[in-house]
Amino acid sequence: MSPLALVLLIAATACAAAWVLSLITRDHSWVDRLWSVLPVVYVWVFAASAGLSDARLNVMAALVTLWGARLTANFARKGGYTGTEDYRWGILRGRMRRWQFELFNLFFIVLYQNAILVLITLPALTALEHTATPFGVLDGLLAALFVALLVGETVADQQQWRFHVWKAAQTDARPRFLQTGLWRFSRHPNFFFEQAQWWVFFAIGAVAAGSVLQWTVLGAVLLTLLFVGSTAFTESITRGRYPEYADYQATTSAIVPWPPRRRDVAPATGTTGG
């Protein structure tokens, strides 16, 4: 069996398991629980198909393993593996008829998201198809950039975790959402670092091929589009809970970290005279 066929078989099994479990448990976060695991498996399949003898593929597999370990640990401490469902699915269920949500569950939550998990790892397939290209300085620089972005995401998630631990201990917490640290420069710095890592992963595969014109860019593109939609939906919920979030939106970059903007202050009305 080719490595791609094996990856697709694993993905199909994951889809079936996530869908059936969602029907049995009425919990629609099973794909979330697989999110940090499946890409690690897929990239190691490609690396193993080269006999673990290709430096580039081994580095790519190691990088994704670090990514998966960090994300798994962060998801676990939030209770993600204890039956806690993503709160957004409950909100969507309330806005849809049951049959509509079940179609959404099958085609978007299960199939579409699992497809993205396969696609973001396919730069490793590109690297597998170009093992004759030696591991070079550019590969090393991109690997270092991936690690730097991983550190950035770790810091952002840790700041968010500490804030929520502090908030849970308060009776009337102010502020009601995080606006300091990396979150002063981006409303979702963790989202920025997450997406950037997979664009760098694509770039490593492109280096192996000697061209950025690779169809495997589709994974990074679709992941970015997924985050765009998810961010808009999440922020609509947050704005409904905290009206002051609109002020934060007006001054702070949505994704890409950037110095905060100053709010325009309306000029005072009236005249002075004597």
Image (tube, rainbow, N blue to C red):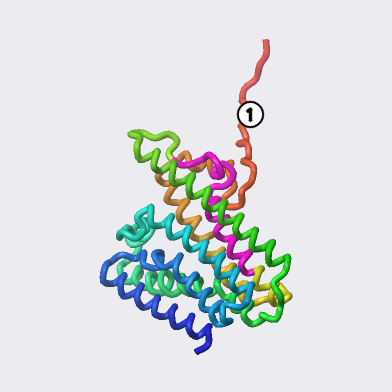
Residue for point 54% across, 74% down: 119
Position of the C terminus, as image quadrant, is top right
Where does the image place residue 228, in percent across and percent down from the top left? 54, 59
Task: Give the residue at mark 1.
Answer: 267
Q: Is residue 189 magenta?
A: yes
Q: Residue furthest top?
A: 274
Q: In this view, does 93 lie to the left or right of 187?
A: left
Residue for point 63% across, 73% down: 55
Where does the image place residue 97, in percent across and percent down from the top left? 32, 66
Q: What stretch is highlighted in magenta?
A: 177-202
Residue for point 62% across, 22% down: 270
Camera-side residue of 6 and 97: 6
> Is residue 25 something one can see in this rendering?
yes
Q: In this view, does 194 lie to the left or right of 29?
A: right
Up-down: is 268 above or below 158? above
Where does the image place residue 118, in percent across and percent down from the top left? 51, 74
Q: In which quarter of the image is residue 35?
A: bottom left
Q: What element carries label 1?
A: loop
Q: In which quarter of the image is residue 79?
A: bottom left
Magenta stretch, main secondary structure, is helix
At label 1, the amino acid type is Pro
Q: Quadrant of residue 121?
A: bottom right
Where does the image place residue 101, in percent across and percent down from the top left? 35, 68
> Is residue 95 something one can see in this rendering?
no
Mark 1 surroundings: few (<14), some (14-19) or many (≥20) residues within 10 A? few
Q: Which residue lies furthest to the bottom in this view?
A: 1
Q: Is residue 260 magenta?
A: no
Camera-side residue of 23 and 151: 151
Q: Is residue 51 left or right of residue 33?
A: right
Residue for point 58% across, 52% down: 255
